[in-house]
Image: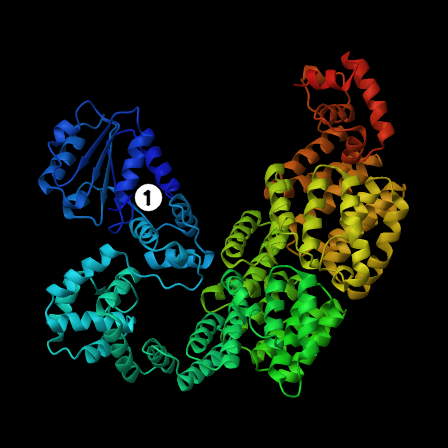
Amino acid sequence: MIIEAACVGRENELSELTGRVADAAGPGFVLITAPHGAGKSTLLRRLSEILRGRRVRVAAAPELGDPAELFGDDPAALLIDDADHADDAALRRLGRLAAARPQSRVTVILAAERSTPAIADLLPDTLRLPGLDRSAVAEIAAARGRSVHPSLLDELTRHTMGRPREIVELLDELPDRLWSRADAALPAPAREVERVRTALTACRPETRRLIEAIAILNDPDSLGTAVELSAVGDVLSAVDEAVGTGLVEPAAAVGPAASALAVPTPVTRAAVLEVLGPKRTGLLHRRASELVADPARRLHHRVAAAPVPDAELADEVAALAADRGGAGEWAEAAELYREAGRLTDEPLRHAERVTLSVDALLADGDCLTAGSMVPTVESLRETPLRNATLAYLAILRGRSAEARIRLDRAWGIVSVEREPAIAALIAQRYVLHCLVRCQGERLVGWADRAIDMAGTASPAGVEAAAIRGLGLAWSGRTADAVASYDALGRNVRFGAQTQRVAIGHGWLQLGLDEVDSARTSLETAVSMANLGGSKRITLWALGWLARLRFVTGDWDGALLTVAQSRELATTSGITLATPLADWTAAQVHCLRGDREAADAAVAHSARLAGDYEIMQIPLLLAQAQIAEAAADYNKVTRVLSPLRLLAEDTPALTEPGWWPWVDVLANALVLDGRLEAADSLLRPHEELADLRGHRSAGARLRYARGRYLGAIGDIASARRKFEEALELLDGLPLRHDQARVNFAYGQTLRRAGKRRAADAVMGNARDIYRSLGATAYVERCDRELKAGGLHAVRGDRSSAELTPQEESVTALVASGMSNREVAAELYISPKTVQYHLTRIYAKLGVRSRSELAALRR
């Protein structure tokens, strides 16, 4: 007996349906369609519970009963399950009753596997119930007391197509020990096996053979091969009967080829193979390997037919795995290496192939599955490959110290002469290690070693070359970096390896202000995620695409990209790129005034505790952005000061255009009154940005220099710097930078008494911030405009006696800010704030900050 799952993963559908019932202005019909076992009945029961307290009628077809009675007392909702089995005449009477009572506000919700003519006559809105996603499947598993390995959780979701009934059946039927394995093969539930057995037994022999052949081949485009494999004579009759069983469907329903047949679900296919039995399944796979044309598919059938180790077959499978890895198709390579290991008896060769399988999983970005196999790899004899693989996992998990120890050990014991391919692989892992440490020259050195040993066409050589350009740029060799990607683009034009070139090129283009080109490259890299691309590469592409969308003002798009990144990071187990995505999320949220969401993004990254620079830098920048949005410039200084020390050994922090921290720290130092420190920080970076001719970095540094010059009273020079900054940004779609420069420029002009000019510039900043939805800074612009006096609000009796500047001070103090924070926010000194407060207290008749806050509540 199957115990039903709770109604999980259906929050959106329940919200939609309850909203339809609540907002009904007249009678209406909604049809919920989904395959058998997808949870339609459970959804209706849960909806009935939610609507309890209202008048709800529940009916089940085919005994629909008298529609007039169901409509009696004008119910708020009428829920009809299995509507496709209801009497057509009863459904038509239901439609006529609804038409005759237009004042009725009843919502009729029907659940069915498919629509029928009688249902269609009701003109219902259709709500198609999708399969449950991974998180909902995990919730069901937890509710049933199962601890499922993350990789097996993905497989359970795919295998069942998210259908709750099959999920629950498998969770209840299979033993505990299976769910902790990453590579377990899932069978069909006992109910489905019995259904398939009954259907096959009822078929004519040649129809049964055709269904079995289709299940063995598992290829919608192979009907001709299936006919040959099954030796069917009367093909059309067999096809008609096979489709009638429901065990196969025209591929138009499950794939692109309308003339082919396929088993509709993985669970049904597993049931067919179980009914076939191991011996018959093996014979059919062996026969299929002689019929199919594709070499890879032929080999897969031979592997499926091999019940015991086979050295010759194992060598063929390993060779194909190497070929697939060379093309960047790492997921398939991992599976092939795993099969090769299963077929290998010789211990050293077996260990090598198991390790290569884990290494391929990591190259694909599947850290969760690879991580589950670490105990197996660690139990093997120490080899350079073993150490390089474990170092790779440490890199992807953000563990710099562990990765360095394992890499050094691997390099120390490898023989470059005897094992050039393994040596090149280790060198390429050093390249990755240097990349995420943001070390340019060391990256280039290891990349050159990898390419020299492996050549430009090998996987290690291609990846090293795809990263090498970034090392060149971080070493100040921008022209060489551009040329290297141009050459790679000509040489690597097809296959999954192009994703690696696209992300490297896009990252470089974004760093060089080539925004449109960067967008194309990064979107290309993301789009290849489903075309054999690596999850690791996809995560980097998503992280930098989110940054691009942030700086260009597409903040909603940036948050959507961050959400994609977080989901992929969860399913892959790769934490390395998460702080990059969280930095963008934190910036958008705090600028839009959602401090809670911004803090949550920072906390998410902080929990990872990775020690790579590529993780620490964006985390610090996110924390600084939140502090700056709160006008806590002393905290900005504390947060970013470690970057000054880190920059001494991290070239990417000093080369302009890669990490925007200098202008943020210099601005905070100025507003915190530490002018000499701001000046000394800016000088070397200004010189380098001018030497490189970098536009956005030059604009940001001029913005900070303008702040400094305004603070020391050199208004003419400050205006010149701000104007230069805006000129550098002209033509670049960097809207956040444009708003930031205008805001600082307006504040500086207002402090100098240039109120009319300040008003115009601050208005520009406000317009940009408003278009971005940056409510926190729109409010700050409004306070600046009001403090300038040209836009003072009239008619407010509570503030009639206050000057615009006093009104701004009052609002900020009443919100809980300290004098120092108010001074930083309004770009005045703390002494000036205290002077204004003394006058405000006298004018409003209050004696303390708490009384002032109470007056303004």
| 10 Å crowding of disc 1: few (<14), some (14-19), many (20+) | some
Q: Can residue 358 be seen in this view?
A: yes
Evaluate whether residue 126 shows in this view.
no
The colour scheme is rainbow
Q: In this view, does 838 lie above or below 690?
A: above
Residue 103 rendering spot, x and y as whole percentages: 23, 25
Q: Which residue is drawn at 79% across and 44% down?
A: 638
Note whether 481 is above or below 593 in the view shown: below
Residue 336 shown left or right of residue 232 in the figure: right
Indicate the quadrant where residue 382 lies.
Answer: bottom right
208, 739: nearer the viewer: 208
From this view, report whether residue 829 is shown above or below residue 151. Answer: above
Q: Where is residue 491 in the image (x, y as percent from the top left)?
A: 57, 80
Among all residues in the image, which is located at the extreme top?
845
> In the shown orientation, is residue 405 left or right of residue 833?
left
Observer-nearest residue: 276 or 758? 276
Query: Which residue shows up at 52% across the image and 76% down it?
Result: 351
Q: Give whichever of 755, 809 is nearer the camera.
A: 809
Residue 773, picture quadrant: top right
Dot 1 falls on a residue whose secondary structure is loop
Relative vertical location of residue 258 with respect to residue 75 in this rendering, above or below? below
- Coordinates of residue 731 in the picture (x, y in percent): 67, 57
Q: Residue 522 location in percent, x, y?
A: 56, 63
Residue labelled with disc 1? 5
Q: Name the quarter where the C terminus is drawn.
A: top right
- Say what amino acid the circle numbered 1 marks: Ala
Residue at figure coordinates x 82%, y 56% from the top left: 645
Residue at image point 68% right, 23% down: 793
Q: Is residue 835 left or right of residue 274?
A: right
